[in-house]
């Protein structure tokens, strides 16, 4: 009777994915600073668009002017999505707010306080995910949290004398604006940057490179 020898299964050793470091690199600091400064210029330019738009919607429903505040929340999610390090959102919002203040703004240096609060809002959400999850839903949550922080902060500092109905509408509008403009908007902006190849030194750039062959295959 023939005897069968047990077949050996050849297994290919799998190398564990390298653990991503949360320590800042020099390139992280440089790119985060460049992006934050660029968004800070956008902050300043947006002042000219915000005034007429916010005045128009405020006539329809007071408090909804916060729907346009999400532009001032873009720095945090954009830089956090690129750099993916603790403190990136906070750093970006403070730098962008400083640039806006230096360029001259009707709110003066109080923009720094706003940048701090808004950056912390986004930072808290990213910290809850241990700075390791940067999918669209998380970025939207970070934007919404920044918008919520903006709404509460503005209601306390600038609209303290307004009634509860106005403040509720303002805070809800700010949260929606943060989710849409700062959340979805930053996601689209970073993806567009990744397509140019300028983010090849970062995880978001490499993710785009890995997706491209499969998406272009017939």
Image: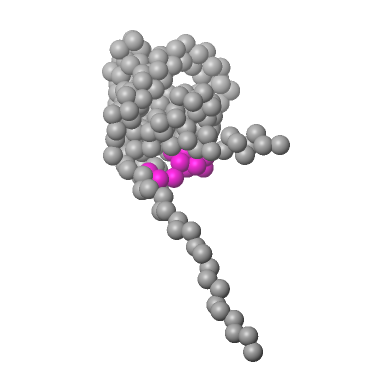
Residue 67, horizontal then vertical, whole percent: 51, 27
Residue at the image position 71 percent from the left and 37 percent from the top = 218
Residue at the image position 51 percent from the left and 32 percent from the top = 187
Residue 136 included in the magenta stretch of the image: yes
Seen in the image, is 47 located left or right of residue 33? right
Which residue is situated farthest in the right direction here? Answer: 218
Residue 1 included in the magenta stretch of the image: no
Seen in the image, is 109 located left or right of residue 76? left
Question: What is the quadrant of residue 72 in the picture?
Answer: top left
Question: What is the quadrant of residue 85 in the picture?
Answer: top left
Residue 150, horizontal then vertical, whole percent: 40, 31
Asked if residue 98 is positioned above or below residue 178 in the image, the reply reads: above
Asked if residue 194 is positioned above or below residue 142 in the image, the reply reads: above
Residue 106, horizontal then vertical, whole percent: 36, 12
Along the viewing direction, whichever of 179 and 79 lies nearer the viewer: 79
Residue at the image position 53 percent from the left and 68 percent from the top = 9
Q: How many marks?
A: 0
Which residue is situated farthest in the bottom direction here? Answer: 1
Residue 160, horizontal then vertical, whole percent: 36, 29
Question: What is the quadrant of residue 27 in the picture?
Answer: top left
* The residue stretch that appears in magenta: 131-144
Residue at the image position 29 percent from the left and 35 percent from the top = 24
Asked if residue 3 is positioned above or below residue 207 in the image, the reply reads: below
Quarter of the image with the N terminus is: bottom right
Q: Can residue 171 be seen in this view?
A: no
Q: Which colour scheme is used?
A: one colour
Q: Can residue 124 be seen in this view?
A: yes
Along the viewing direction, whichever of 106 and 20 lies nearer the viewer: 20
Along the viewing direction, whichever of 15 and 62 lies nearer the viewer: 15
The secondary structure that most of the magenta stretch takes on is: helix
Along the viewing direction, whichever of 40 and 151 lies nearer the viewer: 40
């Amino acid at each position: 009777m023939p005897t069968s020898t047990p077949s050996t299964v050849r297994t290919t050793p799998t190398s564990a994915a390298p653990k991503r470091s949360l320590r800042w690199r020099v390139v992280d600091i440089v790119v985060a600073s460049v992006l934050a400064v660029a968004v800070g210029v956008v902050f300043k330019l947006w002042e000219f668009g915000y005034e007429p738009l916010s005045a128009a919607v405020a006539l329809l429903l007071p408090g909804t002017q916060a729907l346009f505040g999400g532009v001032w929340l873009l720095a945090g999610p954009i830089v956090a999505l690129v750099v993916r390090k603790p403190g990136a959102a906070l750093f970006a919002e403070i730098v962008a707010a400083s640039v806006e203040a230096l360029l001259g703004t009707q709110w003066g240096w109080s923009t720094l306080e706003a940048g701090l609060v808004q950056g912390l809002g986004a930072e808290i959400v990213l910290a809850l995910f241990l700075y390791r999850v940067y999918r669209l839903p998380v970025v939207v949550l970070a934007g919404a949290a920044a918008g919520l922080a903006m709404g509460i902060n503005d209601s306390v500092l600038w609209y303290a004398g307004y009634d509860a109905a106005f403040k509720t509408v303002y805070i809800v509008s700010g949260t929606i604006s943060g989710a849409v403009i700062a959340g979805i908007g930053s996601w689209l902006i970073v993806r567009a940057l990744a397509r140019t190849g300028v983010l090849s030194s970062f995880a978001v750039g490499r993710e785009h490179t890995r997706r491209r062959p499969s998406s272009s295959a017939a």
